Amino acid sequence: MRATVVHEVAPRETAPEPESKPERVAESPPEPLPRTRRLLVVCAHPFDATVTLGGVIAAFADTGTAVQVICMTHDPGPDPDGRRRPVRAAQLLRAARLLGAREATLLEHRAAHLQWNPPEVLATELRSVAGPVDAVLTIDAGAPGSHPDLVRAARAARRVASRLGCPLYAWVPRTWDTDQPPEGVITVTCDRARQRAAIGCHDAPGPRDPAQGPCAEPAGEAADATADEPQDYLTIR
């Protein structure tokens, strides 16, 4: 159950310079992120850390936040003999470095089996691996049809935040039609070039899931699709 640990990943690599594109005016002005010294990112699969949360991770890292990423499984693809695990760990290492995270950890749970673990047990495991934490970030997997792994990871993250008495930030998909997000939603301006570079560290796309971000396409198709979506959104739980 315990962990394949990817140790300190700094210094950060530099993402390739994007091609020149017409500048798009954001729908809402940039907002400062909540001041956070040490952020724990909890996700179900390595691809979730880049496809969905990559822009937010990079934004926090750019403010000086020490970010630790914990992925609870090695990805949904088959790996019967365990040979893919070191490869996936190396891919996550490079992606985390590009995003500015300080540490990345892969736990040994089987993908698509996370739901059979009680959230309290998973929360205890997360606390045993994570360092000091001031806030927790995860994916809001409350949408109908969300992958069971994402749902269980979100519940474990909620319990970690509850035990520590710290904020839980949940990435949410945009579901509103107005220019401004609803009250209580934090707008995060994201560096999509860095996020796409981090996505490119993986050798296969992640699962198609309703609770995925604007980079949910395979890495080769994501570049143009994400150029017009400069913002992600968080709620505080």
Image: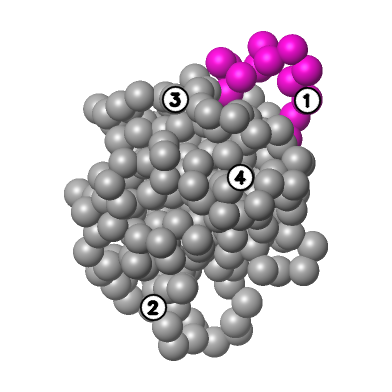
Q: Secondary structure at mark 3?
A: strand
Foreground: disc 3 or disc 1 = 3
Q: Earlier in the sequence, mark 3 or mark 1?
A: 3
Contact? badges 3 and 4 (CB < 8 Å): no
Q: Earlier in the sequence, mark 1 or mark 4?
A: 4
Q: Is residue 44 magenta?
A: no
Span of residues in magenta: 76-88
Residue designated by label 1: 78
Based on the displayed image, in which of its 4 quarters is residue 183 positioned?
Answer: bottom left
Nearest to the observer: residue 88 or residue 131: 131
Foreground: disc 2 or disc 3 = 3
**Marks 1/4: CA–CA distance:** 15 Å
Based on the displayed image, in which of its 4 quarters is residue 156 positioned?
Answer: bottom right
Residue designated by label 3: 5
What is the number of the mark on residue 44?
4
Q: Secondary structure at mark 2?
A: loop
**Marks 3/4: CA–CA distance:** 15 Å
Q: Amino acid at mark 1?
A: Pro
Q: Position of residue 237 (x, y in %)?
A: 46, 73
Residue designated by label 2: 28
The correct choice, above or below, for 191 with respect to 29 in the image is: above
Q: How is the image coloured?
A: one colour
Q: Earlier in the sequence, mark 2 or mark 3?
A: 3
